[in-house]
Amino acid sequence: MAAKKKPPILTLTAEQESEANHKIKRFMQDRFEFDLGSFEAAEILELFTREIAPHYYNRAIFDVQAHLKERFESIESDLWALEKN
């Protein structure tokens, strides 16, 4: 029985997907002199979308959380400075 594929964490527009497939095909040709068909490039893109993109997505979320925490602390400090005695 085949394992159920997990849904992608993000999706691309048709134009973005087409551009990504083109870049994969060009990379494989330029770097390894290997011609990929559209189906193979789409499979590689799907692999990255399902298995690797979540790591980048989670890292971006972590970075935004850290940035927002810093900003909120700065705002809180500014508000304390405005407090009247």
Image: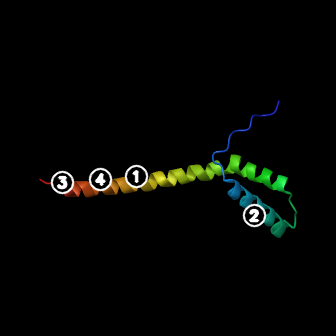
Q: Earlier in the sequence, mark 2 or mark 1?
A: 2
Q: Earlier in the sequence, mark 4 or mark 2?
A: 2
On residue 34, the disc is none
Label 1: few (<14), some or many (≥20) within 10 Å? Answer: few
Residue marked by disc 3:
83
Residue marked by disc 1:
69
Please tell me which residue lies in front, 40 or 61.
40
Please tell me in which quadrant of the rendered image residue 71 appears.
bottom left
Q: CA distance from mark 4 to mark 3?
A: 11 Å
Q: Secondary structure at mark 1?
A: helix
In the drawing, does residue 77 fall left or right of residue 37?
A: left
Instruction: Tell how many labels.
Output: 4
Q: Earlier in the sequence, mark 1 or mark 4?
A: 1
User: Which amino acid lies under the numbered mark 3 shown in the image of this protein?
Assistant: Glu
Residue marked by disc 4:
76
User: Which amino acid lies under the numbered mark 4 shown in the image of this protein?
Assistant: Glu
In the drawing, does residue 19 fall left or right of residue 83?
A: right
Please tell me which residue lies in front, 9 or 78.
9
